[in-house]
Image: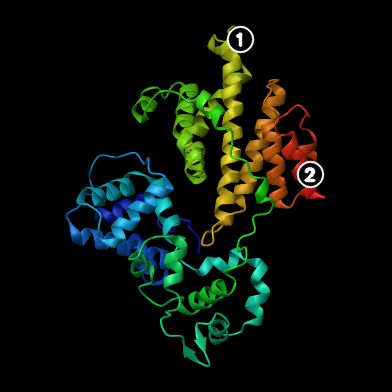
């Protein structure tokens, strides 16, 4: 079940505000009927609208919720325990932020069992051998001799326990129409059968290292979203603010939040502006200031390093989570950003301790590109703090 937005954010806003056109209405109606994620999404909106009056025309607000905060909010909204202020905040963010809209779809899609089979290719043989729902349920101990085991309800409790969305959340996440009930039951059974087995198998996941937090702290700027808008003519300040914002994301291992911030249009535009400035710093009258030049070079290199590490961390988090899809595009984004960081470190003679080499090597290892991984890891100096880690990874790559 993909998380791509099948309804573009402007169309969603128009629909919620009663200003859509027949084409948008027709698309949304079809999704309500046949797309499980959108079924739940629009059902949630309808449910909270019935609880209290909501204003869809309030001033824009900025999304600062982490994925954990978003999950907590969805728990309260779907359980009917959210306050009127929280319901209004959800609508404010939904109308204001395309990123928040997509994150809601991602969070809802995590509760749809259909993608699990795509993330467990190692169990493909088991699916081939267990030919029917009845066989699957019998193998899982849910039914015996054609009779359902007392106290069990396929496709219900396991989802609540795995996701941790709370006691009431399943009633919401259960499809309004049984469009995939048979598949959900089959997958639930296989999950139960293999509950004691490693379900996700992150390749070389044991070699993951949290990106250096102390280096983020040194890059953090003092400011807020309002100061970002006020100083949008200074790309250095913009990147510093983004580092400020991702600090807690990285500490909490919310790499999806870090990716969203570092891959945002504002951050990318700032990075491109710095690259253009560094190609000819004298045109801005600052080329004679070696300190500013070195600071700018380091800031740009840091941006690409942390963006690449965040993409890799996000892939790992999704890969190790039972009901999430690990998009291999994340590995490609990680490799591109880390390769850029490596090139900038060499071009500007920045001593980074080989951090981008290690994370790039790990990225290639997770992609299955062992030769490329070995080449990057072999570049790490014996004096680097990453050298022992690189040697351990190289040993596992043999």
Q: How is the image coloured?
A: rainbow
* Residue 272 in view (yes/no): no
* Residue 394 circle label: 2
Instruction: Place residue 312 in its image quadrant.
Output: top right
Specify whether 112 is left or right of 294.
left
Give the SS element for disc 1.
helix
Q: Which residue is mark 1?
A: 290
Q: Is residue 209 above or below residue 9?
A: above
* Closer mark to the observer between disc 1 and disc 2: 2
Q: Position of residue 332 (x, y in %)?
A: 64, 46
Asked if disc 1 and disc 2 are in contact, CB closer than 8 Å, the reply is no
Give the SS element for disc 2.
helix
Specify whether 150 is left or right of 310.
left
Q: Position of residue 11 (x, y in %)?
A: 35, 53
Mark 1–mark 2 Cα distance, whole angstroms, equals 38 Å
The residue at the point 54 percent across, 87 percent down is 134
Q: Residue furthest left?
A: 53
Number of disc labels = 2
Q: Position of residue 53 (x, y in %)?
A: 17, 54
Mark 2 nearby-residue class (10 Å; few <14, some 14–19, many ≥20): some
Specify whether 79 is left or right of 113.
left
* Residue 187 in view (yes/no): yes
The residue at the point 34 percent across, 39 percent down is 62
Q: Is residue 281 above or below residue 197?
A: above
The residue at the point 66 percent across, 72 percent down is 124
Q: Residue furthest top?
A: 288
Mark 1 nearby-residue class (10 Å; few <14, some 14–19, many ≥20): few
Of labels 1 and 2, earlier in sequence is 1
Q: Position of residue 259 (x, y in %)?
A: 51, 42
Instruction: Place residue 214 in its image quadrant.
Output: top right
């Amino acid at each position: 079940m993909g998380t791509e937005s099948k309804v573009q954010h402007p169309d969603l806003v128009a629909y919620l505000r009663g200003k859509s056109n027949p084409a948008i209405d027709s698309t949304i109606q079809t999704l309500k009927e046949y797309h499980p994620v959108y079924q739940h999404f629009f059902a949630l909106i309808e449910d909270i609208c019935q609880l209290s009056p909501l204003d869809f025309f309030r001033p824009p607000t900025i999304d600062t919720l982490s994925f954990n905060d978003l999950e907590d909010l969805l728990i309260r909204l779907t359980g009917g325990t959210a306050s009127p202020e929280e319901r209004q905040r959800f609508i404010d963010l939904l109308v204001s932020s395309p990123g928040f809209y997509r994150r809601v779809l991602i969070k809802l899609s995590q509760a749809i069992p259909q993608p699990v089979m795509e993330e467990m290719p190692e169990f493909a043989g088991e699916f081939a051998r267990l030919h029917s729902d009845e066989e699957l349920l019998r193998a899982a101990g849910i039914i015996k001799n054609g009779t359902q085991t007392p106290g069990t309800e396929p496709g219900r409790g396991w989802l609540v326990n795995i996701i941790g969305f709370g006691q009431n959340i399943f009633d919401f996440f259960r499809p309004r129409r049984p469009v995939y009930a048979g598949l959900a039951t089959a997958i639930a059974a296989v999950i139960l059968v293999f509950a004691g087995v490693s379900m996700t198998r992150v390749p070389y996941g044991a070699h993951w290292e949290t990106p250096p937090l102390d280096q983020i702290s040194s890059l953090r700027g003092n400011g807020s979203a309002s100061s970002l808008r006020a100083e949008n003519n200074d790309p250095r300040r913009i990147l510093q603010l983004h580092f400020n914002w991702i600090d807690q994301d990285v500490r909490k291992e919310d790499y999806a939040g870090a990716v969203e911030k570092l891959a945002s249009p504002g951050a990318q535009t700032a990075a491109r502006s710095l690259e253009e400035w560094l190609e000819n710093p004298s045109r801005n009258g600052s080329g004679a200031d070696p300190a500013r030049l070195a600071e700018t070079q380091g800031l740009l290199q840091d941006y690409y390093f942390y963006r690449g590490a965040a993409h890799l961390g996000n892939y790992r988090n999704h890969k190790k989570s039972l009901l999430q899809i690990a998009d291999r595009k994340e590995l490609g984004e990680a490799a591109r950003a880390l390769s850029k960081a490596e090139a900038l470190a060499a071009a500007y003679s920045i001593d980074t301790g080989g951090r981008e080499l290690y994370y790039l090597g790990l990225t290639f290892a997770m992609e299955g590109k062992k030769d490329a991984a070995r080449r990057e890891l072999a570049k790490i100096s014996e004096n680097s703090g990453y050298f022992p880690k690189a040697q351990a990874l190289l040993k596992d790559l043999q």
